[in-house]
Image (cartoon, grey):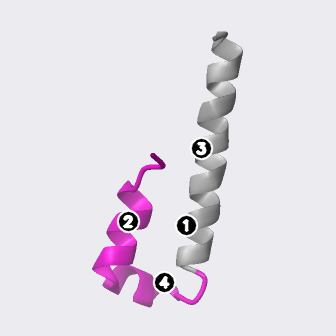
Amino acid sequence: MSDQRQWRFCIDDMIAFAEKVVAYTEDFDQTAFVNSDLTYDATLRGEVS
């Protein structure tokens, strides 16, 4: 597999994760987001498997 193809997979993963973060936090304002330990930790430290 070429290096270019590997980068494409990484970028696709980052985009997919960013889309999930937006969906998970859609109804939160900043205070609610910071006060929700589960959502806060999952979106800041999560990984796409």
Three-letter code for the amino acid on which mark 2 is drawn:
Ala
Crowd tier of the residue under label 2, counting other residues whose Cα lies within 10 Å: few below 14, some 14–19, many 20 or above: few
Circles 2 and 4, Cβ within 8 Å, touching? The answer is no
Query: Residue 7 appears at what percent x and percent y?
Result: 64, 25
Q: Secondary structure at mark 3?
A: helix
Real-space Cα separation, disc 3 to disc 1, in angstroms: 12 Å
Which residue is denoted by mark 4 in the rendering? 30
20 above or below 34? above
Give the quarter of the image for residue 22. Answer: bottom right
Q: Secondary structure at mark 1?
A: helix
In terms of depth relative to the viewer, which is nearer, 30 or 18?
18
Mark whose residue sits in front, 3 or 1: 3
Q: Residue at x 63, y 32 (%)?
A: 9
Disc 3 marks which residue?
A: 13
Q: Neighbour class for label 1 at 10 Å: few (<14), some, many (≥20)?
A: some
Q: Earlier in the sequence, mark 4 or mark 1?
A: 1
Residue 44 falls inside the magenta stretch: yes
Q: Which residue is mark 1?
A: 21
In the displayed structure, would residue 7 be above or below residue 19? above
Distance between the alpha carbons at the discs numbered 1 and 2: 9 Å
| Percent of width and height locating residue 6 | 62, 22
Please state which amino acid type lies under the numbered disc 4.
Gln
At 59% from the left and 43% from the top, the residue drawn is 13
Residue 28 placement, left or right of 6: left
Q: Main secondary structure of the magenta part?
A: helix
Q: Residue drawn at (40%, 56%), measured in percent from left and top?
A: 46
Mark pair 4, 1: CA separation: 14 Å
Badge 4 marks a residue whose secondary structure is helix
User: According to the image, label 2 marks what residue?
Assistant: 42
> Which residues lie in the magenta part?
26-49
